[in-house]
Amino acid sequence: MRKIYMDHTAGAPVDRRVVSAMHPFLEATYGNPSSAHSFAQEAKEGLKDARSSVASLIRAEESEEIFFTSCATESNNWAIRGFAARNHDKGRHIITTTIEHMSVINVCKHLTKQGFKISYLPVDKHGIVDLKALETELTDETILVSIMYANGEIGTIEPIKEASEIVHARNACLHVDATAAIGQFPIDVRKAGADLMTLSSNEIGGPKGVGALYSKKGTRLQPLIFGGGQERGMRSGTENVPGIVGMGKAASLTNLEIGDRITKLKRMRDRLIKGLLSNIPYSFLNGHPSQRLPNNVAVRFSFIEGESMLLNLDMAGVAASSGSACTAKTLEPSHVLRAIGLKHEEAHGSLLFTLGTQNAEEDVDYVVDLLPDIVKRLRALSPLTPKELTGSV
Amino acid sequence: MRKIYMDHTAGAPVDRRVVSAMHPFLEATYGNPSSAHSFAQEAKEGLKDARSSVASLIRAEESEEIFFTSCATESNNWAIRGFAARNHDKGRHIITTTIEHMSVINVCKHLTKQGFKISYLPVDKHGIVDLKALETELTDETILVSIMYANGEIGTIEPIKEASEIVHARNACLHVDATAAIGQFPIDVRKAGADLMTLSSNEIGGPKGVGALYSKKGTRLQPLIFGGGQERGMRSGTENVPGIVGMGKAASLTNLEIGDRITKLKRMRDRLIKGLLSNIPYSFLNGHPSQRLPNNVAVRFSFIEGESMLLNLDMAGVAASSGSACTAKTLEPSHVLRAIGLKHEEAHGSLLFTLGTQNAEEDVDYVVDLLPDIVKRLRALSPLTPKELTGSV
């Protein structure tokens, strides 16, 4: 059976060239970069090159503004809690949005137990954060604002530059979770005005188990993990050298190839959206129609459940998602879909396809051929479907 | 030039069979284990098998007592801080030792800022923790005791079973940092009586960037990293599937081969210790003569500096260490060597060789041939060397 993978935001293959770059650091160059001998020197060089490649990808001023972590979730935890721990003398108010990843939302919940007040900015029906509300919520007590660069579940890209100007005018700092955004469009961290930025490796073709945090020079941050003082005292623990080297290689490849990737992804994305919306009645796009990640096809179909569609797609060899993989375990509708104003049943009828460069136009056409029949079949069984639709089965 | 690597505690090669086991999870089985489709199923199976292999290696009662982390440092942070956060209603006293890894010591320092009192147990000249002092220090306020299973810098294996009986008699819990111990001798976590145990991957031939924490069923622990609720809500962040699969494979190989490994390592260790101590005057063993890790050769030489010996060894192709890689960045003598009563200059004259199964008897003989000349040369240059020794150069 043909196997088509369209769940790249949840997990992506590691680029073959990245695997090759990692290999020597698994079997041959296994020194600890903190050691004094020449075996360590090679590991140290590997770290240095990787740091510089990741810095280049987001146009950071200095390599030393990049700190490697174990994943984007750790980076989000560190950015917000580490900043809160070092800056609460200035205030205990943090602003975020209603559509952040659970690692931001649950960290904020945790901080309320430590006396922090959290404000959640609303978003419009396309998922664009309300900048007027940001201006209103900012007070002299506000130390940090955390807004994602793009939402992986609905594809919407947020107006980060505009947000950073508002935040900095009130002397607060801006954390940007760029997990879903990295590699999807060119990022210039300085132009964007982020003080802290979370970066993922797997989203750009690097391995799982590694991530990074950009921390602008001068940003006051307490470590999240204490110990031997690796990463210039900011993130202890023996460095995941092969993983970091892999992330670095993925960053440098992304830097070179991002233009071609975007072109390819956008073409497939638009073909898939158009194919589904025009072939399936009562189908809608989730998220912003144009301010949208090139790999993101988030759609919903009235009267039926995303889970049943997923199961049918899976049986036909197509891997997609009903939302964030991180919330796949619960049966609750996604907080993101609720935040853009979808009713319970609308949220439940959602499907998410995230494309990768390994996908081909034929994959798109296969799904466009396949899904209308699945939807028809499920609607015929659904008590919610209006008569005129079941009649047409 | 011949290259001999004897710094395995700092960083070890990944077993070729482990690399092969990881490979499919980098390039082919890249699904997110939290997703619903069949791509995810294979990743989920990989995690499950790895968890069961690691549980078997330490004879845990249930696989679900194993939680994967990004490294032993994270596990130590989590065990102590996560336990403190959930159990401070019972008391705010924690006991540890003067020879723990910096990730334990710096976490304890951090906790003092949150109102915890920390007691540091002394060790004897061989590095064995003082169990009488443990009995004395335990109070009704003591919630946790953290003692390492073995010290990687001096090789000494601690009397964990005896310690756990004392700790449990006072209704406290025991955390054991088994980073340096795992794979060096058979560990039975239940017989040892640990409630929490830190495990490393690289020390058993698995990759860097992954570790684990054993948490006995019923132990109250707060997560260190919040988010999407992976690892049954205890450690968020997309799982490092290839890394975890690698650690699992390394654990199952260790389980099978530990007997042969110990025999081989002990033979080389004893040959190296005997060769060095009998060929170099004013040389001494650091750590316990018999309660000792099979891979550990920690020695010291009077009148000269470890750093100069390291440099000379490195130029001759031999990678060793002057102590913990995590403290290699500072010029301070190791806190471990000070804790066993060595004077400043004795600590500075220390060298650490940690062997691996890739080493051969010829490597040992090469070092035994090489080092006496290096020591002689350096002593001839040292103003501290007594006349009768320099005369013999």
Image (cartoon, coloured by chain):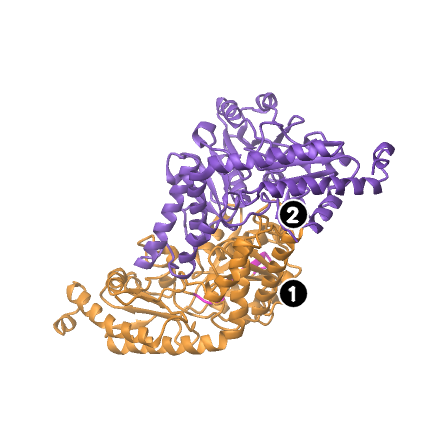
Chain colours: A purple, B orange
Say above or below: A83 vs B240. above
Q: Quadrant of residue B55?
A: bottom right
Could you tell me which residue is drawn at 37 percent across and 37 percent down?
A62
Q: State the SS at label 2.
A: strand
Q: Amino acid at mark 2?
A: Ala
Q: Which residue is mark 1?
A: B62
* Coordinates of residue B290 in the picture (x, y in percent): 41, 77
> How many marks overall?
2
Q: State the SS at label 1.
A: loop
- Does the magenta-highlighted stretch encompass residue B125? no
Marked residue chain, label 1: B
Q: Which residue is mark 2?
A: A319
Q: In front here: A218 or A386?
A: A386
Q: Amino acid at mark 1?
A: Glu
* Coordinates of residue A342 in the picture (x, y in percent): 73, 31
Q: What residue range appears in magenta?
A: B139-151
What is the CA distance from the residue labelled 2 to the residue labelled 1? 32 Å
Say above or below: B38 vs B150. above
Say above or below: B25 vs A84. below
Q: Residue furthest left?
A: B391
- Does the magenta-highlighted stretch encompass residue B144? yes
Is residue B385 visible in the rendered structure shown here?
no
The circle on residue A253 is none
Q: Is residue A41 left or right of residue A130?
A: left
